[in-house]
Image: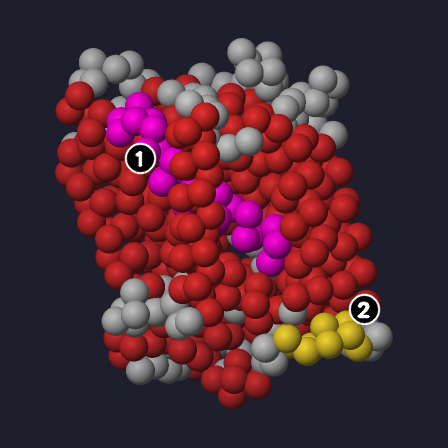
Amino acid sequence: MSDHGLIRTLSRKEVLVLAVGAMIGWSWVIMTGVWISSAGTLGTLLAFVVGGFAILLISLTYAELVSAMPKVGGEHVYTQRAFGRTGSFICTWAIIMAYVTVPIFEAAALPTAMEYLFPNIKLGYLWRIYDADVYISYAIIGVVASIIMTLINYLGVKFMAVVQTTITSGFLIVGVMFLAGVGVNLDFANAQPLFVDGHIGFFAVLTMVPALMIGFDVIPQSAEEINLKPKLIGKLLVISVAAAVLWYCLISLGVALSLDNQQIDNSIMATADATAEVWQGQWAGNLMVVAGIAGIITSWNAFILGGSRAIYAMAKAGMLPAVFARVHHKHRTPYVAILFIGVLSCIAPFFGKTILIWLINSGSFAVVIGYGMVALAFLQLRKTEPDMPRPFRVKHGVLVGRSAFILSLCLAYVYMPWGPGSLLWPYEWVMVLGWVLLGVIFYALSSAKK
């Protein structure tokens, strides 16, 4: 047990599965057709390679820092040591926005996924919010799932890890089954066109990559609950990022080789349709949708863990209300922070999918800010504390740190009003600015109290 009351219990397999399950959510089932239609086969693969390389560099800075400071809260710890209270608050507050938006969004994504299996699931029309219809049946599914996911995390990190390992293993098996079918039925003619809309199509996919790869940092968030040597924690973090990038590339290539251009354009769930095509049966497509639902659950599960630990770490530091720092006497989980995220997830299905998409886009921008600050903390600590023990020490650290920071700036540029993937004005920018304002209020209150 750590000094904070958390338990070091996560094994090597559980740590790897936690991060991979966080990064591989639902998008690999529902979005592959959008990617290929937007950028073409090679355009999509190139976007994932470039975006994945950027995230891999960023993950290297995390890997060194988590091995040096395997404490709960991850980014909060690194930036506080490098920049003090203010820098730590800014970074962790941005990370929390990104983390909390994912479980909220998943509460609405789950009913949408289930509609593929049960087409008549829409019952009890409630209202319409920004072009999104809300149904009581959707809301009930989202609320019940939110309660279950909250309970899984409430009952302890070990129980959560068992659930995560089981479900992640299931959808990986289905994905490998799909790729095996593609290998038997190769048709390279389907890969055309290789590129669509040149650099515009490439950037359309590239802007999505940071949001898809959010999740590797659940490892540093939960570092105080990992029962491994610090050096191995750093290695597993980098391995998880490489595995997720490879998975997205292989699935995208598999879909491109299985369906022709017209089939992809007409598909609302390309990976499921591609699986049905290569295995010559709708049963296979339905099984892939189940795998996608499993991906929703693993991502949801991991982000409740990561978000609750970030909130807990800030509360322990006196930056958020002390109630969020409470640890359950039996389950050893930050249960108030977990319940807070659970309540938000229960409310989310009643607001419609459009608003929740705006929210998660805003969160994707916020996490890029966090990544940039971690890269700066990495460089700062290399300068101010060169003798700090670093079990996982990155070679050519200054070059890697600077590259990670520059790439973070490039990713942030993409979301700017003048960037190729700019956030929607005023809706998504209002969400970002509203979160900033809420952070200013909390920071002022915590500073006055301190």
Q: How many marks?
A: 2
The question of residue 16 being in magenta is answered with no
Residue at left offset 41%, top offset 37%: 443
Q: How far apart are the alpha carbons under marks 1 and 2?
A: 43 Å
The stretch of residues the image draws in magenta is 80-106
Question: Given the image, on which type of amino acid does mark 2 rest?
Answer: Ile
User: Residue 166: horizontal and vertical position, in percent?
Assistant: 69, 40
Task: Say which of 296 and 303 sits in front.
Answer: 303
Task: Place residue 370 in its image quadrant.
Answer: top left
The answer to which of marks 1 and 2 sits earlier in the sequence is 1
Q: Quadrant of the C terminus?
A: top left
Work out whether residue 374 can be spotted: yes
Please give left or right for residue 239 compared with residue 202 in the image. right
User: Residue 167: horizontal and vertical position, in percent?
Assistant: 68, 45
Residue at left offset 68%, top offset 45%: 342
Decide: few, some or many residues near mark 2? Use Cα within 10 Å; few <14, some 14-19, many ≥20: some
Residue 382 drawn above or below residue 106: above
User: Residue 94: horizontal and vertical position, in percent?
Assistant: 41, 45
Task: Place residue 216 in its image quadrant.
Answer: top left
Q: Any mark on residue 87, and which?
A: 1
* Visual colour scheme: secondary structure
Task: Say which of 286 and 24 sits in front.
Answer: 24
Work out whether residue 239 can be spotted: no
Magenta span main SS: helix
Question: Given the image, on which type of amino acid does mark 1 rest?
Answer: Gly
Q: Any mark on residue 136, and which?
A: 2
Residue 15 drawn above or below residue 282: above
Asked which secondary structure carries label 1, the reply is: helix
Q: Quadrant of the N terminus?
A: top right
